[in-house]
Image (cartoon, grey):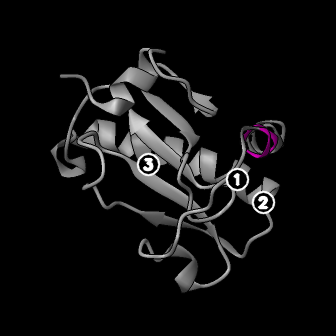
């Protein structure tokens, strides 16, 4: 069965897309820890990030870096935190999270509840930066 992220890749489910190429997709997390929290995924459905072939994993990190730079310009923060947890969805993904302190990346914190309008505003801000 296709993962939730594969359904997003196949346009079966909507997403607030930040960047895309033939191998990767970046989109806003709909349950973000911080405004501008983005997920980066490979378009190939691979469950565990360390099962990704080396060259593709390297390309994924370079893609994530370009997205992180856009987030950093668009969202006020000290850094873009990077996390790989890999338990929420059985499809490898990297979290890019605007942070000002280490506690901003605590996954046990309550998730933000943002309206569709707020999500579109954040998306547009990152994309047009």
Q: In front: 100, or 67?
A: 100
Quadrant of residue 90 within the rendered picture = top left
Q: Secondary structure at mark 1?
A: helix
Q: Position of residue 29 (x, y in %)?
A: 54, 47
Label 3: how many Cα within 10 Å (few below 14, some 14–19, many 20+): few
In the drawing, does residue 28 fall left or right of residue 23?
right
- Determine if the magenta segment contains residue 90: no
Q: Secondary structure at mark 2?
A: loop
- Is 71 located above or below residue 33 in the figure? above
Tell me how far mark 3 sits from mark 2, CA to CA. Answer: 20 Å
Label 2: how many Cα within 10 Å (few below 14, some 14–19, many 20+): many
Q: Main secondary structure of the magenta part?
A: helix
Q: Earlier in the sequence, mark 3 or mark 1?
A: 3
Q: According to the image, label 3 marks what residue?
A: 61
Tell me how far mark 3 sits from mark 1, CA to CA. Answer: 15 Å
Looking at the image, do the residues carrying marks 2 and 1 touch, with CB atoms under 8 Å apart?
yes
Identify the disc placed on residue 30: none
Q: According to the image, label 2 marks what residue?
A: 75
Q: Mark 3 or mark 1, which is nearer to you? A: 1
Q: Earlier in the sequence, mark 3 or mark 2?
A: 3
Q: Position of residue 67 (x, y in %)?
A: 62, 45
Q: Position of residue 125 (x, y in %)?
A: 82, 44
In percent of the image, x 48 and y 22: which residue is there? 13
In percent of the image, x 37 and y 46: which residue is there? 93
- Tell me the quadrant of the picture where the N terminus can be found: top left
- Magenta residues? 117-121
Q: Mark 3 or mark 2, which is nearer to you? A: 2
């Amino acid at each position: 069965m296709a993962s939730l992220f594969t359904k997003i890749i196949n346009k079966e489910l909507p997403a607030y897309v930040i960047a895309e190429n033939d191998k990767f997709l970046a989109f806003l997390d709909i349950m973000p820890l911080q405004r501008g929290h983005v997920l980066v995924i490979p378009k190939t459905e691979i469950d565990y990030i360390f099962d990704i072939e080396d060259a593709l994993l390297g390309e994924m990190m370079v893609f994530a870096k370009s997205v992180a730079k856009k987030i950093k310009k668009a969202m006020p923060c000290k850094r873009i935190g990077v996390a790989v947890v890999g338990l929420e969805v059985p499809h490898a993904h990297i979290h890019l999270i605007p942070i000002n302190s280490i506690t901003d990346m605590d996954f046990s914190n309550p998730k933000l509840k943002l309206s569709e309008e707020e999500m579109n505003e954040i998306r547009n801000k990152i994309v047009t930066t």
